[in-house]
Amino acid sequence: GAPRQAASPARAAPPRVAAAAPRRAAPAPPPSSRALLAPPRGRRLLPVPPAPPQPPRGLLVRLPLPAHSLPYLLSRLLRRLAALPPPHAPLPYALSVFSAHSPPDPFLAAALLRFALLTQPPLSPFRLFSRLLHTPRGELPFLPFAFSPLAKSAAAARSLPAAQAAHAVSILLGGFDKHRFVENSLIGAYVACGDVGAARKVFDEMVVKDVISWTSIVVAYSKSGDMGCAEEVFAQCPVKDMVAWTAMLTGYAQNSMPAKALEVFDRMATIGMGIDEVSLTGAISACAQLGAVRRAAWVQEIAERNGFGQNVIVGSGLVDMYAKCGLIDEARSVFDGMQEKNVYTYSSMIVGLASHGRAKEAIALFKDMVRRADVVPNHVTFIGLLTACSHAGMVRDGHFYFAQMKDKYGILPSADHYTCMVDLLGRAGLVDEALDLVRSMIVEPHGGVWGALLGACRIHGNTDVAKVAAEHLFKLEPEGIGNYVLLSNTLASAGKWDEVSKVRKLMRTRGLKKDPAVSSFEGRDGLVHQFFAGDNSHPKTNEIKKALLELAAKLKHAGYVPILTSIVYDVSDGEKERLLMGHSEKLALSFGLLTLGSRCTIRIVKNLRICDDCHLFMRLASRIEQAEIIVRDNMRFHHFKDGECSCGGFW
């Protein structure tokens, strides 16, 4: 038994001394861990606090809780488990929690399926659902809540067969497809899988629709590019919340309808609808597409007024927006003013600097990013960096960063990176080297790669390589009208009119029509005016053309000689000169000078590449009219000032 304790320490007897001879001393026990950790003599350590007591385990199954409350408590436990980071939310433990209640509870089964949706790989809820169907303890009656995780799992996996399976079992096991939240989940699954027809069928058969139902169909049509049907559904929606308005806004922005997107954003602001990060991002994207300077400042003002001034996602979008509006210095100002920057912020700024031909600044910012800011670049960062090298003709630097991307940062080059390199080599006149690079690619070249090579052939008149590139493009993009036009123009510049006729005949046979050249100009009032090549629809057409002829006369007096090779039709020189005067960017310039006058800044956005003649025309006009002319074509920005261009004649 335990040794008896003395009644009082004060009365304890002193130790007795043995009279016999002393025995050999027993070996001292090894020092305990406490002794090993003891401080040296003369020093004291703070007392170590005792370890907190471990909470008792399995309380939910050990305590005498009411039976009717146990499924609810266990489902709450599964919800908390699902919120834990991996690997602390194992499925076997969740199954044990489910099995702790007998007989199987349908409410707990729905919670288990939701747990699988949140913590397991896509489509895992289907395997678990099949297991629950064959539970050995009798038939389990499912609740409607159980089918929503199945539909959401199908949506996450982008699996149309899985979406159809979720729809089927919801019907077969009790007609649960007529419950509104199940219907909304099915619509979301079909939308995610791209089956707009099935989503609309579920929607039309709904007895009661809510704002989620209406918004989901708007999103479905927006994703499919059918903004006409999206408009019809949105107009019929009885209640429009911020999510519904945002769906229309982002739909317009994603389908290259920026003016419509900004109309929706304007309407949201007018009626006092809430503005969030998503709606702001859509409006920012629309401004970037449109190149509308005044709208850009307006959107930034709304962002700051609604407390998104220092939001890193909105800030990164503003950087991109200002860069695409031609305001690269304003983009840098927003960038420098951001307290938090991530890789997307840096990448947006690097891409913006590249498009404006400021290659050295782009490279300097990249170095600052990886050294001082310690931000790891991604694939977009290197696209911007390689584009900067391409637009400045920096072949050696391009080769260096292309190699560093893989060797130092472990980023395998994608087809987009190869496109940048082919463009870099091709613009520098190294067309054969560019073709060799394409043939040595470690990934399959897409249309962008061959398109960059074909564009280089157009610049340098290499018809042999142009035919090779075009042959691949016609297979990859049989409906891509621009490829046929590029090949036709390349052949026309070389005077091979018979081959030009064959290409144009092929275009007619396939029913392809050339995209019309269009240039836009933002007036002083913020209204955007569009001009098409040879167009007479503008209300001030006569004034515009008269002013343009007067400007051309001034430029000819200053040495301007039209570059007739910019017209690739086999017509007379006089007809070529007439066609050149009808180019859309020249019409936009003339209108800009009419409305703003000389010594002003004129910004023009064109959907196609600026031709050699218009480039020369803009360069000379900037000197004669003492105006700064900024042209954004589909390749880059050109800043014309004092008779020079920021591209240095390399574009």
Image (cartoon, rainbow, N blue to C red):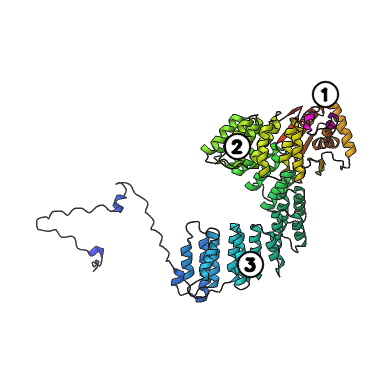
Q: Secondary structure at mark 2?
A: helix
The C terminus: image quadrant? top right
Q: Is residue 423 magenta?
A: no
78 vs 182, nearest the viewer: 182
Q: Which residue is mark 2?
A: 438
Disc 3 crowd rating (10 Å Cα; few below 14, some 14-19, many 20+) is many
What whole-number distance in Å separates the C-alpha atoms at marks 2 and 3? Answer: 50 Å
Q: Secondary structure at mark 3?
A: helix
Q: Secondary structure at mark 1?
A: loop
Q: Is residue 322 above or below residue 158?
A: above
Image coordinates for residue 358, horizontal then vertical, percent: 66, 33
Q: Which residue is mark 3?
A: 182
Disc 2 crowd rating (10 Å Cα; few below 14, some 14-19, many 20+) is many
| Residue 474 circle label | none
Q: Amino acid at mark 2?
A: Val
Horizontal placement of 551 versus 456: left or right?
A: right
Q: Is residue 399 above or below residue 258?
A: above
Going from N to C along the chain, the mark reached first, 2 or 1, is: 2
What whole-number distance in Å separates the C-alpha atoms at marks 2 and 1? Answer: 44 Å
- In this picture, which residue range is highlighted in magenta? 555-578
Q: Is residue 568 magenta?
A: yes
The answer to whether mark 2 and mark 1 are in CB contact below 8 A is: no
Name the residue located 86 percent from the left edge and 30 percent from the top edge: 574
Based on the displayed image, in which of its 4 quarters is residue 19 positioned?
A: bottom left
The answer to whether mark 1 and mark 3 are in CB contact below 8 A is: no
Q: Amino acid at mark 3?
A: Val
Q: Which residue is mark 1?
A: 558
